[in-house]
Amino acid sequence: MGSTETTVGKDGRAPGADGSGSSAGVSRGDGHDLAGLEAGLDALDTVHTRRTPLRETLVQKVLPPVIAVALVLVVWQILVWAKVTDTYKLPPPADVWQEVVGAWEQGTLLDYIWTSVSRGLLGFLLALAIGTPLGLLVARVRFVRAAIGPILSGLQSLPSVAWVPPAVIWLGLNDSMMYAVILLGAVPSIANGLVSGVDQVPPLFLRAGRTLGATGLRGTWHIVMPAALPGYLAGLKQGWAFSWRSLMAAEIIASSPDLGIGLGQLLEAGRTNSSMSQVFLAIFLILLVGIAIDLLIFSPLERRVLRGRGLLVKS
């Protein structure tokens, strides 16, 4: 702020008291105050980002889950040594590792993973293509929301495994049955996530868009979708989770030589053969795929959205 002190001249009067130089002094003071205020506002609006060093990333993000996994393995081995239960019910970690090594040497480990991952990703993309326009339709048209909204919520709460028997009867034991189960499990989650995101868009954004001529599809693309992106992304993450769980349920229940051997079939084969080490192998691979998809796809998308809204300080 400008100084409030007044300098008195030799004649005992303040500068500009006779009217000369007063406007120039005031304008200079106001200019300095305005410039300082603008600089302060710019500093508040500016989000300072920095690239996280590799060592800090390893310590904060990589080391904690590694320690957690190590602790689980230690507790697991202690339970085996303590003979809490029979080894055929709780095999030691070394037996599960031998299953991993054996599947790798036979060349089947990657086949198990790819068979399920390819189905899951393709089914999720199909659900994305159907759930996105459906969610926009439900969010923007009142009659459609009143008619379909409760049905989508009901379908989202319905266990995915319930769709496997009718899908087998309708479509038979083939990949189409798998994709149908994935769609029925994932589409409601994606659509409801987008509906929730659209409901949270401030009305001021919509009015500003209409004022600028962004109406119809243009308004949806440039105003509604960017503003609803956080809720939509949450719906996508949940939709992938439902896709993956639906696929595992379908693979466990419906098995056929024509379908190949995915992770769900591997889990069921371990149960049939009473091989708990094979069961644990399938469980760990299913968990590993879920974590990998989240870390490689959804976490970067979430960070990008947060960074674009100034909510993520560290890049």
Image (cartoon, rainbow, N blue to C red):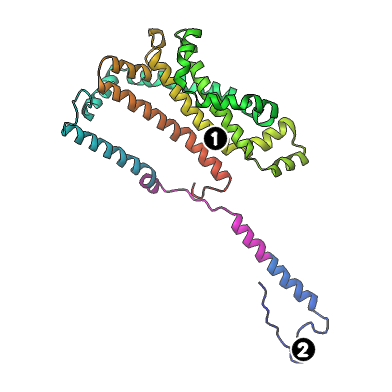
Which disc is residue 150 wearing?
none
Q: Circle 2 — which element?
A: loop
Q: Residue at x 19, y 31 (%)?
A: 84
Q: Is residue 36 magenta?
A: yes
Per the picture, the main secondary structure of the magenta-coloured stretch is: helix
Most distant residue in the bottom direction? 11
Q: Is residue 53 magenta?
A: yes
Specify whether 140 is left or right of 300. Answer: right
- Coordinates of residue 234 in the picture (x, y in percent): 53, 35
Q: Is residue 288 above or below residue 48?
A: above
Most distant residue in the right direction? 19
Question: The disc labelled 2 sits on which kind of residue?
Answer: Arg
Q: Is residue 194 above or below residue 25?
A: above
Specify whether 295 is left or right of 71. Answer: right
> Of the residues under marks 1 and 2, which one precedes in the sequence?
2
According to the picture, the residue beneath numbered tag 1 turns out to be 233
The residue closer to the viewer here, 66 or 48, is 66
How many numbered discs sit on the rendered protein? 2
According to the picture, the residue beneath numbered tag 2 turns out to be 13
The residue closer to the viewer here, 214 or 274, is 274
- Coordinates of residue 77 in the picture (x, y in percent): 21, 34
Q: Write the start and end of the magenta stretch as one range.
A: 35-59
Foreground mark, 1 or 2, reads 1
